[in-house]
Image (cartoon, rainbow, N blue to C red):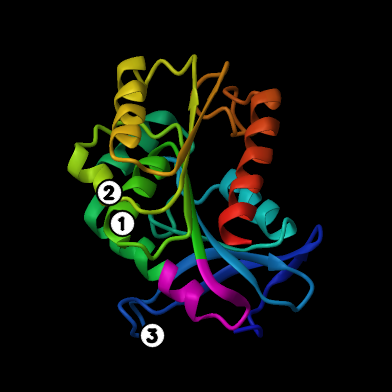
Amino acid sequence: MIGDHLDEKNGALAGLVRYPANGVAGPQSLEGFLARPDDGKPHPGVIVIQEWWGLEPHVKSLTERLARDGYVALAPDLYHGKVASEPDDAMKQMMALNLDQAVDEIQQAIDYLQSREDVQPKKVGVVGFCMGGRLTWRVAERENGELAAIAPFYAGGFQPTAEDIRKVTAPALVVWGEQDRGIPVSQREHVEKLLRQEGKTFKVLLYNAGHAFMNDTHPTYDQAAATQAWSELLAWLKRYLG
């Protein structure tokens, strides 16, 4: 697997990879964007889950940044080659996505990372943005202790029950934008209340920014908040993945 055909990009090796679906290689194999440090050494793995746009340049850029910071990072292509450029198209793609199937595909991406010889120790974290933040929670509910850490960024539409949160065992870095009009204050408070109530290991970051403030390819980008949040993310991953 070290022999993947990856291109050198600013200190990281990156490119599209195919990996088995349900443990079987062939026409139904899955695809994602993988980046790893260009040092030939093993590193912990991180899954990066896309926004509602798809596997766009922003997601690839974040994946490459994680590689430059010492992780083998993989962004699974949940839209299977489709990338939206307009909000209406993105909404249609997101609404058409089967969430259970998406969680299955993310799990297979995790399995693939853990199978790679350049991922050591066999620890994997999951980072997701917008729609990907919600999917991060869904994956963590199913993982049953297998994830080392999660970091859902501005996860919209996430209204968990106490039972849902009880299933989450990975330490959670929960990131919100205070000016995010799509995520009510009551939702943020509900999630934090349940995390505290269920005795989870977590940290909540609330920035004076809007939704998708990490995305430097859209007008929602907030450089100050994005810079601070990235530093916090790296510290979280370092703490729990090494």
Q: Is residue 224 left or right of residue 25?
A: right
Tell me if residue 98 can be seen: no
Real-space Cα separation, disc 1 to disc 2, in angstroms: 7 Å
How many numbered marks appear?
3
Question: In the rendered structure, which amino acid carries the disc numbered 2?
Answer: Leu
**Residue at 64% in and 25% down:** 225
Q: Earlier in the sequence, mark 1 or mark 2?
A: 2
Question: In the rendered structure, which amino acid carries the disc numbered 3?
Answer: Ala
Q: Regarding mark 1 in the picture, which secondary structure is present there? A: helix
**Above or below for 99 versus 190:** below
**Residue at 27% in and 43% down:** 165
Q: Which mark is residue 25?
A: 3
Q: Regarding mark 2 in the picture, which secondary structure is present there? A: loop
Residue under circle 2?
Answer: 97
Q: Is residue 122 left or right of residue 65?
A: left
Q: Are marks 1 and 2 in contact (CB under 8 Å)?
A: yes
Question: In the rendered structure, which amino acid carries the disc numbered 1?
Answer: Ala
Q: Regarding mark 3 in the picture, which secondary structure is present there? A: loop
Magenta residues, start to end: 110-123
Q: Which mark is residue 102?
A: 1
Residue 239, position in %: x, y?
A: 61, 53
The image quarter in which residue 207 lies? top right
Tell me if residue 51 can be seen: yes
Q: Are marks 3 and 2 in contact (CB under 8 Å)?
A: no
**Residue at 65% in and 47% down:** 234
Packing grade of label 2 (10 A; few <14, some 14-19, many >=20) is some
